[in-house]
Image (cartoon, rainbow, N blue to C red):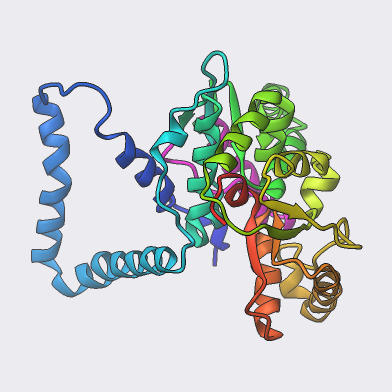
Amino acid sequence: MAPLWAACPALPLKVAAALGSRRAGAGSAKPESSWATVGRWLPIAILVIDFLSHPLKFVLTSVWPGICTAGFILNAMLHRRIAPVNASFFSSALYDGTMKVGLFVTCLVDTMRPEIGFSTVKLLESVGCEIAFPMAQTCCGQPGFNSGDSVTARALALQFMAQFDGLDYVVVPSGSCGGMIRHHYPELFAQDPDLRGRAEAIAARTYELTSFLVDVIGERALQAVAEQARARPPGATVSLTYHDSCSGLRELNIHDQPRALLAQCPSVVVQEMPNARACCGFGGTFAVKYSDVSTAIADEKLAGVRATAAQCLVMGDLGCMLHLEGRMLRCGDEQTRVLHVAQVLAGEY
């Protein structure tokens, strides 16, 4: 049987749908061409034909997944995991000149926590970036690469390069996916000079989110975050502690960048845990292959979190988030919130 990542189709792309719907009314209305009319009605006709041909199959493969997705989003909204869009936030284009930035949302974010993608979009637009969202983006190839399946990893890397070629930058709300692209794509094509050149070029333009905001945009990004913080309604100060995910820290040298951005939020107090730079025990498939070791490492990390008495645990990788949040819940801690740094910087906490 082929591995899961080898059969990865185009993602559901909830983030793209939200981004597209928000921009749907922009600009003046234009007459719809005949081809646009065909493009609008053809999918509906195909769905009707599919339903008439195979009613049960249609319900199981089309209707039921849609209901599940709607339920997930509604549940997230009810629990304040998805905050309403603040229209004034999008108008603060502080960056001089428009960068065309490709958003690689990652498999986990799009599937498990699309609200992180929404927050990333808000942050990028706040500094004046024009966001490109390739609809055919899939996996970066990291699961295959880490499992020794270099053939599939190369195929997915080629797909990634084809989708994000020609952009000024590619931004990823994940240190592990960012590390895969920046460090391991050139390695995948080491024996092919032409493809290695392409891989090196796109690797040099790919940044983890906080690194892009601080190392590329710079002072203006700090101003944008501070502006968003001032726009929040007055409230109690929130204490948080930050976990440095391994790939971001060790492959991309991400440590000071998220802290510099969080320092712009006056209602946030960062309390450093004693083992902030230590692994959380996730490591992708490591947590599956060596679950006992993974759990023990997570418990050490969470002991450091408890020592700070912080209300929130914040980090830049969703894999680590799900791992630590799951362990917290299994240990009975339902009070400590686990958030992605993009959510905090966008004021959604």
Q: Which residues are magenta?
A: 134-162
Using residue 330 as the reference point, say whether residue 24 is left or right of it.
Answer: left
Point out residue 188 in the picture as x, y percentages from the top left corner. Answer: 73, 39
Using residue 275 as the reference point, say whether residue 157 is left or right of it.
Answer: left
Q: Quadrant of the N terminus?
A: bottom right
Camera-side residue of 247 and 5: 247
Q: Residue at x 84, y 75 (%)?
A: 303
Residue at the right extreme of this rendering? 274
Residue 12 can be seen, yes or no: yes
- Which of the 4 image quadrants contains residue 274? bottom right
Q: Quadrant of the C terminus?
A: bottom right
Point out residue 88 in the picture as x, y percentages from the top left corner. Answer: 42, 34
Give the vertical position of 48 relative to 289 (above or below): above
Point out residue 250 in the picture as x, y percentages from the top left corner. Answer: 85, 46
Give the vertical position of 78 relative to 197 (above or below): below
Camera-side residue of 114 and 50: 114
Point out residue 216 in the picture as x, y percentages from the top left corner. Answer: 70, 25
Q: Residue at x 26, y 64 (%)?
A: 62
Using residue 193 as the reference point, say whether residue 29 is left or right of it.
Answer: left
- Which of the 4 image quadrants contains residue 27? top left
Residue at the top extreme of this rendering? 97
Q: Residue at x 77, y 38 (%)?
A: 183
Using residue 51 as the reference point, say whether residue 117 is left or right of it.
Answer: right
Q: Residue at x 52, y 59 (%)?
A: 113
Camera-side residue of 145 and 91: 91
Q: Main secondary structure of the magenta part?
A: helix
